[in-house]
Amino acid sequence: MSHSYKGFLNTTLNYSKTIDGINETLEIVDGIYYSRPGNIANSEAISLSVDANIPITKWYNLIVYAEAGRLSFQSALYTEQLNSAGNYQYISLNNSLQLGKGWSAEVRGEYHSDLVYAQLLIKSFGTLNLAISKKILKDAGTLKLNANDLLYTRRSDGIINNLRLTDADWNSDLDSRAVTLTFSYRFGKTENSRRRHTGSGVGERAESGEDLEGRLCL
């Protein structure tokens, strides 16, 4: 169920229930871990999300997305009984800056709280990404410099539950911090540039921008 307020603030309430769903399951037998798709009898998810596109000034636009919810899982699982549930939160802030003379910049930050997902507790993390771009070749080309996970805080860390007589967790170092330089070029004419104007006014020049997005993927 969704609601839109004046075209810039959107609120969504979501509920889902899954019966006999398939998820990753983990089992330990004689000290060996087995990861395989398995049946999780029942799961439920409820969430409330809000997103807004806020034009602060003519040159500064802020896109906000926030989500809060609860996940629960119940199932007989190998030698154990799975009964896990937990709340989570997610927020992303995307700042778009138009600096003039074809220059623009983007600053994006996001935060994921701890997340319970079937047997797993995925621990919280946050990231900070930066980008700066310049239009060239009569605005047909764009050079863009991206810096992803600038603070190197994107982690893969968590706890594995429902293992017989065993406590287990994992911690992975991800190759998430990177700097890239990209070039894009737009071929052909835009719709507005092909349109004929019969009046005496000056023709309009259309400029296109990129939308930023941050979601929690389950």
Image (cartoon, rainbow, N blue to C red):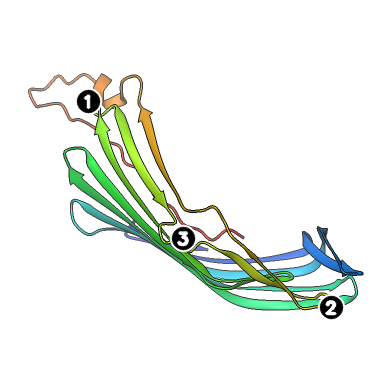
Residue annotated with mark 3:
152
Pointer 1: what residue?
138
Instruction: Say what amino acid the circle numbered 2 marks.
Output: Gln
Question: Quick check: can you spot residue 9?
Answer: no
User: Looking at the picture, does residue 6 appear above or below residue 193?
Assistant: below
Nearer the observer, 93 or 146: 146
Q: Is residue 148 left or right of residue 216?
A: left
Q: CA distance from mark 2 to mark 3?
A: 37 Å
Identify residue type, mark 3: Tyr
Residue drawn at (20%, 30%) of the image: 205
- The vertical placement of 68 against 189, above or below, is below
Mark 2 vs mark 1: which is more N-terminal?
A: 2
Question: Sequence-wise, which precedes: disc 1 or disc 3?
Answer: 1
Q: Residue furthest left?
A: 200
How far across and how far down the image is residue 54, in percent?
Answer: 29, 59
- Comparing 57 with 169, the one in front is 169
- The quarter of the displayed image where residue 168 is located: bottom right
Closer to the camera in the image, 179 or 75: 179
Which residue is at 19% across, 47% downward?
99
